[in-house]
Amino acid sequence: MDNKKRDGGPLTAPCGEGRGPRASSRLGLAGLVWLLCALFFSLWWGEGGNAPHVAEQGGPVVSGLRPDAAGRQAASAEEREARPAWAALHALVSQTLPRALPFAHWQCEDEASGAGGARRYRITGPCAPLRLAVALLEKLRPAASLDSAPLPGVGGNTARPRLSWTDEGVLEMRLNGRLSHSFHFPGRERELADLARPMPAAALILVMDDLGRRLEDAEALAALPFPVALAVWPLAPKSGATAALAGQMALDCLVHLPMEPLPRADGSRPAPGPGALLTNMSTRALAAVLEPALAAAPTALGLNNHMGSAFTGSAAASRRLCAQLAGRGLAVLDSLTQPHSRLAEEARAAGLVSLSRTVFLDTRRKTSAILAALDAAAARARSGGFAVAIGHPYPETFSALRRWQDKTGVAVIPLRRLLWHLAQRQGDAG
């Protein structure tokens, strides 16, 4: 009998019959070899080979990763490096807010978790918003020496945080170009938008001393076509109402702080009034007078001296005062009631924003003389970039202010714009 498989063919021969592996087994083995070869070439191509690294969307692959993966890895590394700086900035803001704006109310909105999350503050109540910006600049200045410490993670390859005001009146802080904090002052956007504008080539700042006895004086100044800063006696009967009116009319306010004067030529000593700072005061006694004075005008940008020729002439007394002001964003305007005053100098040494009076408007109480003094102040502004003129609430001064016009290109600007300009310049120099 012929021993052939009836439907025989070489493809169906069983193993063990002496004619090689079964066809199905050979097919499976070939498939396995093909799979191993494909895996080998795939790994070789992905790891380097000789082929160029080209991403699917046309960009180069970085370190064997697709662009989206590489970007996430780089962003994650950058976030880890920035985390200490961002945490330090959050802590700095939390510490600075109550010192700069002690009578304000604030709410942190849209707080994002994790490093790199910007925080949005909404601030209301009686306050001078510029003080927050100036206080933060004081803290962020590298050379700051009073009441400050270096920010962890800020320095080296990390840029310093930058503060700026927007055209919408919002204060923004950015680190390496990324927004870290924004501060919004509802209802005050228009006055704060001024701070985003550059200084004019010639700027005149007008300040009116000795306010707070009559509200009518402040109302007359608010009706002028240009801004005048109101320097308010803290213990005057209408000081609170005057400071409140200044806030309502978007006018700047200063605490007009009485200080000890020098004796007159005849030996008599003029009385600076209650609540005066004296040269022999200890730090504690000085603070006991200063704190109620500052609390009387919570919208004040800073202070200037009423009288005070003895106090401001003392470097030690001026230094004690400026140490009390540090960290609050308060500015110091030295009225220069004596030619050798040390107040502005000590304020700068303490890291405060400071400036000095350029012209007294009404040493001669005649309208014509006051108009001439305004012209002289404008001339000083044109030659020096800015000038500060101080007047007093005399009828002749009000008459001159209503009549005066400068036609030579001098801009009368709010005090806050000059203070912000000086704060930024001082911060850049630091």
Image (cartoon, grey):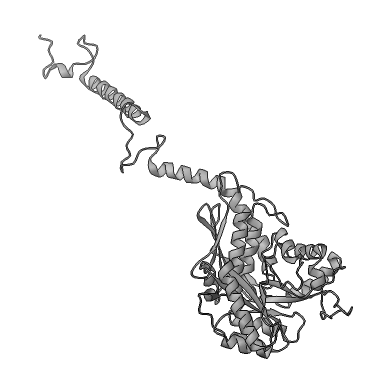
- Give the side of residue 315 with respect to residue 8, left or right: right
Q: Is residue 91 among what the camera can see?
A: no
Residue 47 figure quarter: top left
Give the residue drawn at x 30%, y 42%. 58
Q: Position of residue 192 (x, y in %)?
A: 55, 72
Residue lying at the far right in this picture: please name it.
267
- Give the side of residue 41 with respect to residue 344, left or right: left
Foreground pick, 76 / 371: 371
Quarter occupied by the N terminus: top left
Residue 271 figure quarter: bottom right
Q: Is residue 330 above or below residue 406?
A: above
Q: Is residue 232 above or below residue 46?
A: below
Give the residue drawn at x 82%, y 69%. 286
Q: Position of residue 35 (x, y in %)?
A: 29, 26
Q: Is residue 183 among what the camera can see?
A: yes
- Give the side of residue 136 with respect to residue 13, left or right: right
Q: Is residue 335 above or below residue 76?
A: below
Foreground pick, 388 / 104: 388
Q: Position of residue 106 (x, y in %)?
A: 62, 69
Residue 38 figure quarter: top left
Badge count? 0
Give the residue drawn at x 51%, y 76%. 408
Q: Position of residue 134 (x, y in %)?
A: 63, 64
Quarter occupied by the C terminus: bottom right
Foreground pick, 396 / 376: 376
Foreground pick, 27 / 252: 252
